[in-house]
Image (tube, rainbow, N blue to C red):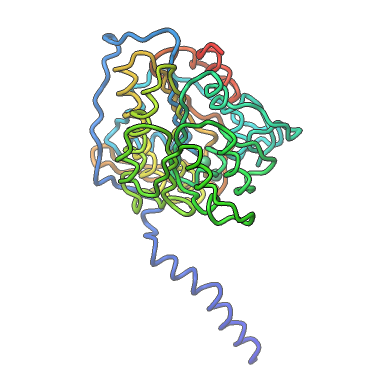
Amino acid sequence: MTQKLLSLVLSYIFIICPAFSQEIETDTLSKTKFVNKHPHDVAVINHENLQFESKPKNIILLIGDGMGVAQVFAGMSANGGELHIQNMKHIGFSKTQSSSAYVTDSGAGGTAIATGNKTYNGAIGVNPDTVPVHSILEIAEANGKATGLISTSAITHATPASFIAHQPSRYMMEEIAADFLKTDIDLFIGGGLQYFTKRTDGKNLVEELQKKNYQFVDTLSDLLNINHGKVTALLASEHLPPYSKRGEMLVPATEKAIELLSKDDDGFFLMVEGSQIDWGGHNNDLSYVTEEVLDFDRAVAIALEFAIKDKNTLVIVTADHETGGLALLNGNLSKGAVEGQFIHDYHTGEMVPVFAFGAGAEKFMGIYENTEIFDKMIRLFGF
Ligand code: MG
Ligand code: ZN
Protein backbone atom coordinates (compact mmCIF):
# COMPACT_ATOMS: atom_id res chain seq x y z
CA MET A 1 0.00 0.00 0.00
CA THR A 2 2.74 2.45 1.01
CA GLN A 3 4.67 1.41 -2.09
CA LYS A 4 1.66 2.09 -4.26
CA LEU A 5 1.23 5.51 -2.69
CA LEU A 6 4.92 6.27 -3.19
CA SER A 7 4.77 5.31 -6.84
CA LEU A 8 1.69 7.48 -7.27
CA VAL A 9 3.47 10.45 -5.73
CA LEU A 10 6.56 9.79 -7.85
CA SER A 11 4.55 9.49 -11.02
CA TYR A 12 2.85 12.77 -10.17
CA ILE A 13 6.20 14.50 -9.70
CA PHE A 14 7.94 13.02 -12.72
CA ILE A 15 5.17 12.61 -15.23
CA ILE A 16 2.12 14.74 -14.54
CA CYS A 17 3.89 17.71 -12.97
CA PRO A 18 6.30 18.55 -15.80
CA ALA A 19 3.56 17.95 -18.34
CA PHE A 20 1.32 20.32 -16.43
CA SER A 21 3.93 23.06 -16.21
CA GLN A 22 4.57 22.69 -19.95
CA GLU A 23 0.88 23.21 -20.65
CA ILE A 24 0.97 26.51 -18.78
CA GLU A 25 3.85 27.78 -20.88
CA THR A 26 2.34 26.95 -24.24
CA ASP A 27 -1.18 27.79 -25.24
CA THR A 28 -2.61 24.41 -26.23
CA LEU A 29 -5.14 26.03 -28.54
CA SER A 30 -2.39 27.80 -30.49
CA LYS A 31 -0.79 24.47 -31.31
CA THR A 32 -3.70 23.62 -33.59
CA LYS A 33 -4.93 27.10 -34.50
CA PHE A 34 -3.19 30.31 -35.51
CA VAL A 35 -4.65 33.77 -36.00
CA ASN A 36 -2.29 36.29 -37.58
CA LYS A 37 -2.36 39.67 -35.84
CA HIS A 38 0.34 41.19 -38.06
CA PRO A 39 -0.28 40.32 -41.73
CA HIS A 40 2.34 41.71 -44.11
CA ASP A 41 1.60 43.47 -47.40
CA VAL A 42 2.29 41.52 -50.55
CA ALA A 43 2.73 43.56 -53.74
CA VAL A 44 1.88 41.59 -56.86
CA ILE A 45 4.85 41.64 -59.23
CA ASN A 46 3.92 42.32 -62.85
CA HIS A 47 5.99 39.76 -64.74
CA GLU A 48 5.27 41.27 -68.16
CA ASN A 49 7.52 44.22 -67.40
CA LEU A 50 10.41 42.07 -66.16
CA GLN A 51 13.51 41.20 -68.15
CA PHE A 52 16.18 38.87 -66.79
CA GLU A 53 19.46 37.54 -68.12
CA SER A 54 19.22 33.88 -69.24
CA LYS A 55 21.96 32.83 -66.80
CA PRO A 56 22.45 34.28 -63.32
CA LYS A 57 25.56 35.89 -61.92
CA ASN A 58 24.07 35.56 -58.42
CA ILE A 59 22.00 32.83 -56.79
CA ILE A 60 20.01 33.30 -53.58
CA LEU A 61 18.76 29.93 -52.33
CA LEU A 62 16.22 30.11 -49.52
CA ILE A 63 15.47 26.84 -47.72
CA GLY A 64 12.45 26.55 -45.48
CA ASP A 65 13.41 23.55 -43.37
CA GLY A 66 10.38 21.26 -43.14
CA MET A 67 8.31 23.47 -45.45
CA GLY A 68 5.90 21.36 -47.46
CA VAL A 69 2.88 22.61 -49.39
CA ALA A 70 0.72 22.62 -46.24
CA GLN A 71 3.23 24.80 -44.38
CA VAL A 72 3.32 27.26 -47.30
CA PHE A 73 -0.47 27.36 -47.39
CA ALA A 74 -0.68 27.81 -43.60
CA GLY A 75 1.38 30.98 -44.05
CA MET A 76 -0.68 32.01 -47.05
CA SER A 77 -3.97 31.52 -45.18
CA ALA A 78 -2.68 33.43 -42.17
CA ASN A 79 -1.62 36.27 -44.43
CA GLY A 80 -5.03 36.74 -46.02
CA GLY A 81 -4.36 34.44 -48.98
CA GLU A 82 -1.15 36.08 -50.25
CA LEU A 83 2.57 35.41 -49.79
CA HIS A 84 5.58 36.95 -51.55
CA ILE A 85 6.45 33.38 -52.59
CA GLN A 86 3.42 33.53 -54.92
CA ASN A 87 5.31 36.02 -57.08
CA MET A 88 7.65 33.17 -58.06
CA LYS A 89 5.94 31.77 -61.16
CA HIS A 90 8.28 28.92 -62.09
CA ILE A 91 7.35 26.04 -59.83
CA GLY A 92 8.48 22.46 -59.51
CA PHE A 93 8.61 19.62 -57.02
CA SER A 94 11.66 18.03 -55.42
CA LYS A 95 11.79 14.36 -54.39
CA THR A 96 13.50 14.22 -51.03
CA GLN A 97 14.40 10.56 -50.45
CA SER A 98 17.94 9.97 -49.14
CA SER A 99 20.30 7.12 -50.07
CA SER A 100 19.47 5.36 -46.80
CA ALA A 101 15.80 6.13 -46.21
CA TYR A 102 12.47 7.01 -47.77
CA VAL A 103 12.21 9.82 -45.22
CA THR A 104 15.27 12.06 -45.21
CA ASP A 105 16.81 14.08 -42.41
CA SER A 106 18.17 17.60 -42.89
CA GLY A 107 21.76 16.34 -43.23
CA ALA A 108 21.06 14.16 -46.26
CA GLY A 109 18.47 16.65 -47.55
CA GLY A 110 20.88 19.58 -47.24
CA THR A 111 23.76 17.61 -48.74
CA ALA A 112 21.61 16.64 -51.76
CA ILE A 113 20.74 20.27 -52.51
CA ALA A 114 24.22 21.59 -51.66
CA THR A 115 26.35 18.96 -53.45
CA GLY A 116 24.13 16.99 -55.85
CA ASN A 117 24.77 13.74 -53.99
CA LYS A 118 22.19 11.47 -52.42
CA THR A 119 23.66 10.34 -49.12
CA TYR A 120 22.68 8.66 -45.86
CA ASN A 121 20.66 10.34 -43.14
CA GLY A 122 22.91 12.29 -40.79
CA ALA A 123 25.67 12.89 -43.36
CA ILE A 124 27.11 16.39 -43.82
CA GLY A 125 28.72 17.11 -47.20
CA VAL A 126 29.92 13.54 -47.70
CA ASN A 127 28.73 10.76 -50.04
CA PRO A 128 27.47 7.33 -48.84
CA ASP A 129 31.14 6.22 -48.47
CA THR A 130 31.79 9.26 -46.21
CA VAL A 131 33.97 10.81 -48.93
CA PRO A 132 33.74 14.66 -48.96
CA VAL A 133 31.87 16.10 -51.96
CA HIS A 134 32.12 19.74 -53.09
CA SER A 135 29.19 22.04 -52.45
CA ILE A 136 27.77 24.78 -54.65
CA LEU A 137 29.10 27.27 -52.11
CA GLU A 138 32.65 25.89 -52.34
CA ILE A 139 32.50 25.74 -56.15
CA ALA A 140 31.17 29.30 -56.32
CA GLU A 141 33.96 30.40 -53.97
CA ALA A 142 36.60 28.65 -56.12
CA ASN A 143 35.23 30.51 -59.14
CA GLY A 144 35.71 33.89 -57.51
CA LYS A 145 32.19 34.52 -56.29
CA ALA A 146 31.36 35.87 -52.84
CA THR A 147 29.49 33.40 -50.62
CA GLY A 148 27.31 33.48 -47.54
CA LEU A 149 25.14 31.42 -45.20
CA ILE A 150 22.32 32.58 -42.94
CA SER A 151 20.38 30.43 -40.50
CA THR A 152 18.08 30.92 -37.51
CA SER A 153 19.55 27.76 -35.96
CA ALA A 154 23.19 27.20 -34.99
CA ILE A 155 25.21 27.83 -38.17
CA THR A 156 26.75 24.39 -37.52
CA HIS A 157 23.31 22.73 -37.72
CA ALA A 158 22.63 20.25 -40.53
CA THR A 159 21.23 22.53 -43.24
CA PRO A 160 23.86 25.30 -43.29
CA ALA A 161 26.60 22.78 -42.41
CA SER A 162 25.83 20.80 -45.59
CA PHE A 163 27.02 23.77 -47.67
CA ILE A 164 30.42 24.14 -46.04
CA ALA A 165 31.40 21.16 -43.89
CA HIS A 166 32.33 17.55 -44.60
CA GLN A 167 31.69 15.24 -41.66
CA PRO A 168 30.29 11.72 -41.36
CA SER A 169 27.75 12.87 -38.76
CA ARG A 170 25.66 16.00 -38.26
CA TYR A 171 26.26 15.74 -34.52
CA MET A 172 30.01 16.51 -34.86
CA MET A 173 29.34 20.20 -34.15
CA GLU A 174 32.89 21.15 -33.16
CA GLU A 175 34.34 19.49 -36.27
CA ILE A 176 31.71 21.22 -38.40
CA ALA A 177 32.62 24.60 -36.84
CA ALA A 178 36.30 23.97 -37.62
CA ASP A 179 35.40 23.33 -41.27
CA PHE A 180 34.31 26.98 -41.58
CA LEU A 181 38.01 27.90 -41.37
CA LYS A 182 38.91 25.65 -44.28
CA THR A 183 36.93 27.76 -46.75
CA ASP A 184 36.92 31.35 -47.88
CA ILE A 185 33.26 31.98 -47.16
CA ASP A 186 32.68 35.71 -46.94
CA LEU A 187 29.86 35.87 -44.47
CA PHE A 188 27.93 33.63 -42.11
CA ILE A 189 25.15 34.61 -39.76
CA GLY A 190 23.37 32.38 -37.24
CA GLY A 191 23.74 30.82 -33.81
CA GLY A 192 26.24 28.27 -32.52
CA LEU A 193 28.88 30.50 -30.88
CA GLN A 194 29.73 27.81 -28.30
CA TYR A 195 31.04 25.45 -31.01
CA PHE A 196 33.61 28.12 -31.95
CA THR A 197 34.65 29.27 -28.48
CA LYS A 198 33.86 26.61 -25.85
CA ARG A 199 35.52 23.64 -27.45
CA THR A 200 36.94 20.43 -26.07
CA ASP A 201 40.19 21.10 -28.00
CA GLY A 202 40.54 24.46 -26.23
CA LYS A 203 40.80 26.37 -29.51
CA ASN A 204 39.10 29.72 -29.99
CA LEU A 205 37.89 29.64 -33.57
CA VAL A 206 36.56 33.20 -33.38
CA GLU A 207 40.13 34.43 -32.77
CA GLU A 208 41.32 32.27 -35.66
CA LEU A 209 38.61 33.72 -37.89
CA GLN A 210 39.63 37.25 -36.86
CA LYS A 211 43.22 36.42 -37.90
CA LYS A 212 41.73 35.53 -41.31
CA ASN A 213 40.29 39.07 -41.49
CA TYR A 214 36.74 38.25 -40.42
CA GLN A 215 34.91 40.90 -38.43
CA PHE A 216 33.23 39.13 -35.52
CA VAL A 217 29.92 40.30 -34.06
CA ASP A 218 27.50 38.69 -31.64
CA THR A 219 24.59 41.12 -31.91
CA LEU A 220 22.29 41.99 -34.78
CA SER A 221 22.84 45.74 -34.32
CA ASP A 222 26.63 45.28 -34.63
CA LEU A 223 26.06 43.19 -37.74
CA LEU A 224 23.94 45.93 -39.29
CA ASN A 225 26.75 48.47 -38.71
CA ILE A 226 29.19 46.54 -40.89
CA ASN A 227 29.56 48.00 -44.37
CA HIS A 228 32.25 45.93 -46.06
CA GLY A 229 34.48 42.90 -45.70
CA LYS A 230 34.16 39.40 -44.31
CA VAL A 231 31.78 38.74 -41.43
CA THR A 232 31.23 36.10 -38.76
CA ALA A 233 27.98 36.86 -36.91
CA LEU A 234 27.17 34.34 -34.18
CA LEU A 235 24.09 35.71 -32.47
CA ALA A 236 23.35 32.91 -29.97
CA SER A 237 25.28 30.31 -28.05
CA GLU A 238 23.14 27.56 -29.59
CA HIS A 239 20.06 28.37 -31.69
CA LEU A 240 18.25 31.66 -32.03
CA PRO A 241 14.88 31.65 -30.26
CA PRO A 242 11.59 31.15 -32.14
CA TYR A 243 10.24 34.16 -34.08
CA SER A 244 7.92 35.10 -31.20
CA LYS A 245 11.03 35.82 -29.08
CA ARG A 246 13.63 36.38 -31.82
CA GLY A 247 11.74 39.15 -33.61
CA GLU A 248 13.23 40.65 -36.75
CA MET A 249 16.51 38.91 -37.50
CA LEU A 250 16.14 36.89 -40.68
CA VAL A 251 14.96 39.84 -42.79
CA PRO A 252 17.64 42.38 -41.74
CA ALA A 253 20.33 39.66 -41.90
CA THR A 254 19.25 38.80 -45.46
CA GLU A 255 19.27 42.49 -46.44
CA LYS A 256 22.75 42.99 -44.97
CA ALA A 257 24.11 39.83 -46.57
CA ILE A 258 22.87 40.83 -50.04
CA GLU A 259 24.26 44.36 -49.54
CA LEU A 260 27.72 43.01 -48.63
CA LEU A 261 27.94 40.09 -51.06
CA SER A 262 26.68 42.09 -54.06
CA LYS A 263 29.81 44.28 -53.84
CA ASP A 264 31.73 41.41 -55.51
CA ASP A 265 31.89 41.98 -59.28
CA ASP A 266 32.10 38.21 -59.88
CA GLY A 267 28.68 37.64 -58.30
CA PHE A 268 27.65 35.69 -55.25
CA PHE A 269 25.95 32.61 -53.80
CA LEU A 270 23.85 33.02 -50.66
CA MET A 271 21.88 30.36 -48.78
CA VAL A 272 19.25 31.61 -46.33
CA GLU A 273 17.54 29.09 -44.08
CA GLY A 274 14.23 29.46 -42.26
CA SER A 275 15.40 26.76 -39.86
CA GLN A 276 12.59 26.66 -37.38
CA ILE A 277 9.63 25.89 -39.64
CA ASP A 278 10.89 22.34 -39.06
CA TRP A 279 10.93 22.69 -35.28
CA GLY A 280 7.36 23.94 -35.26
CA GLY A 281 6.53 20.71 -37.10
CA HIS A 282 8.48 18.54 -34.65
CA ASN A 283 6.63 20.29 -31.82
CA ASN A 284 3.30 19.80 -33.63
CA ASP A 285 2.74 23.51 -33.10
CA LEU A 286 0.88 25.20 -35.95
CA SER A 287 1.43 28.72 -34.57
CA TYR A 288 5.19 28.11 -34.39
CA VAL A 289 5.19 26.77 -37.97
CA THR A 290 3.10 29.60 -39.36
CA GLU A 291 5.02 32.44 -37.70
CA GLU A 292 8.26 30.98 -39.04
CA VAL A 293 6.80 30.65 -42.56
CA LEU A 294 5.66 34.30 -42.45
CA ASP A 295 9.11 35.46 -41.29
CA PHE A 296 10.72 33.35 -44.03
CA ASP A 297 8.36 34.82 -46.65
CA ARG A 298 9.43 38.35 -45.70
CA ALA A 299 13.05 37.29 -46.24
CA VAL A 300 12.03 35.90 -49.65
CA ALA A 301 10.65 39.37 -50.49
CA ILE A 302 14.09 40.92 -49.88
CA ALA A 303 15.65 38.46 -52.34
CA LEU A 304 12.94 39.08 -54.97
CA GLU A 305 13.32 42.85 -54.65
CA PHE A 306 17.07 42.53 -55.27
CA ALA A 307 16.54 40.18 -58.24
CA ILE A 308 14.14 42.62 -59.91
CA LYS A 309 16.62 45.49 -59.65
CA ASP A 310 19.68 43.37 -60.51
CA LYS A 311 18.27 41.33 -63.47
CA ASN A 312 21.24 38.98 -63.06
CA THR A 313 20.01 37.04 -60.04
CA LEU A 314 18.20 33.74 -59.59
CA VAL A 315 16.10 33.24 -56.46
CA ILE A 316 15.13 29.70 -55.45
CA VAL A 317 12.80 28.85 -52.56
CA THR A 318 12.50 25.23 -51.50
CA ALA A 319 12.59 22.79 -48.59
CA ASP A 320 14.67 19.77 -47.64
CA HIS A 321 11.55 17.79 -46.60
CA GLU A 322 8.16 18.23 -44.98
CA THR A 323 7.84 17.95 -41.20
CA GLY A 324 4.92 16.68 -39.16
CA GLY A 325 2.55 15.54 -41.91
CA LEU A 326 0.59 18.74 -41.47
CA ALA A 327 -2.99 18.82 -42.72
CA LEU A 328 -4.97 22.07 -42.77
CA LEU A 329 -8.52 21.40 -41.70
CA ASN A 330 -10.05 24.85 -41.48
CA GLY A 331 -9.21 28.48 -41.99
CA ASN A 332 -10.49 31.98 -42.64
CA LEU A 333 -8.56 34.10 -45.11
CA SER A 334 -10.18 37.40 -44.13
CA LYS A 335 -9.38 36.79 -40.47
CA GLY A 336 -5.91 35.34 -41.15
CA ALA A 337 -6.90 32.18 -39.30
CA VAL A 338 -5.75 28.65 -39.97
CA GLU A 339 -6.33 25.35 -38.18
CA GLY A 340 -4.54 22.08 -38.67
CA GLN A 341 -3.22 18.84 -37.25
CA PHE A 342 0.01 16.92 -37.50
CA ILE A 343 0.18 13.20 -38.10
CA HIS A 344 3.44 12.64 -36.20
CA ASP A 345 6.50 14.45 -34.83
CA TYR A 346 9.10 13.68 -37.52
CA HIS A 347 9.66 14.36 -41.21
CA THR A 348 7.56 12.87 -44.02
CA GLY A 349 8.55 11.54 -47.44
CA GLU A 350 6.45 13.52 -49.90
CA MET A 351 7.69 15.90 -52.57
CA VAL A 352 8.29 19.50 -51.56
CA PRO A 353 7.75 22.61 -53.70
CA VAL A 354 10.50 24.50 -55.52
CA PHE A 355 9.72 28.10 -56.47
CA ALA A 356 12.06 30.03 -58.78
CA PHE A 357 12.28 33.65 -59.90
CA GLY A 358 14.67 35.64 -62.07
CA ALA A 359 17.56 34.62 -64.31
CA GLY A 360 17.14 30.95 -65.32
CA ALA A 361 14.01 30.40 -63.21
CA GLU A 362 12.22 28.42 -65.97
CA LYS A 363 14.73 25.56 -65.49
CA PHE A 364 13.10 24.71 -62.17
CA MET A 365 9.74 23.58 -63.53
CA GLY A 366 8.79 19.91 -63.33
CA ILE A 367 9.33 17.04 -60.91
CA TYR A 368 12.90 16.02 -60.15
CA GLU A 369 15.25 14.68 -57.47
CA ASN A 370 16.51 17.12 -54.82
CA THR A 371 20.04 16.58 -56.22
CA GLU A 372 18.93 18.24 -59.47
CA ILE A 373 18.60 21.56 -57.67
CA PHE A 374 22.40 21.46 -57.35
CA ASP A 375 22.81 20.29 -60.97
CA LYS A 376 20.63 23.13 -62.26
CA MET A 377 22.45 25.77 -60.18
CA ILE A 378 25.86 24.56 -61.41
CA ARG A 379 24.72 24.54 -65.06
CA LEU A 380 23.23 28.02 -64.73
CA PHE A 381 26.36 29.39 -63.09
CA GLY A 382 28.23 27.82 -66.03
CA PHE A 383 30.77 25.86 -63.96
MG1 MG B 1 17.75 23.00 -40.86
ZN1 ZN C 1 13.57 18.15 -38.60
Q: Is residue 304 left or right of residue 172?
A: left
- Whether 69 is drawn above or below 246: the answer is above
Residue 114, image quadrant:
top right
* Quarter that holds the C terminus: top right
Question: x, y percentage for residue 41?
Answer: 23, 33
Tell me if residue 100 comes above or below residue 346 in the rendering: above
**How many tags in the picture?**
0
> Residue at image x 38%, y 14%?
312
Q: Position of residue 5 (x, y in %)?
A: 60, 87
Q: Which is more toward the observer, 117 or 345?
A: 117
Rendered position, 296 above or below 204: above
Say left or right for 249 vs 367.
left
At a point 44% along the width and 47% down the height, the residue shown is 234
Q: Residue 181 or 75: which is nearer the viewer?
A: 181
> Which residue is outermost to the bottom?
2
- The N terminus sits in image quarter: bottom right
The picture places residue 13, in percent across and down from the top left corner, at: 53, 78
Against 301, residue 241 (above or below) is: below
Residue most extreme to the front: 211
Residue 206, given in percent of the width and then of the height, sits at 50, 47
Looking at the rendering, which quadrant does residue 112 occupy?
Answer: top right
**Between residues 356 and 15, which one lies in front from this camera angle?**
356
Q: What's the residue at 36%, 38% (across, down)? A: 253
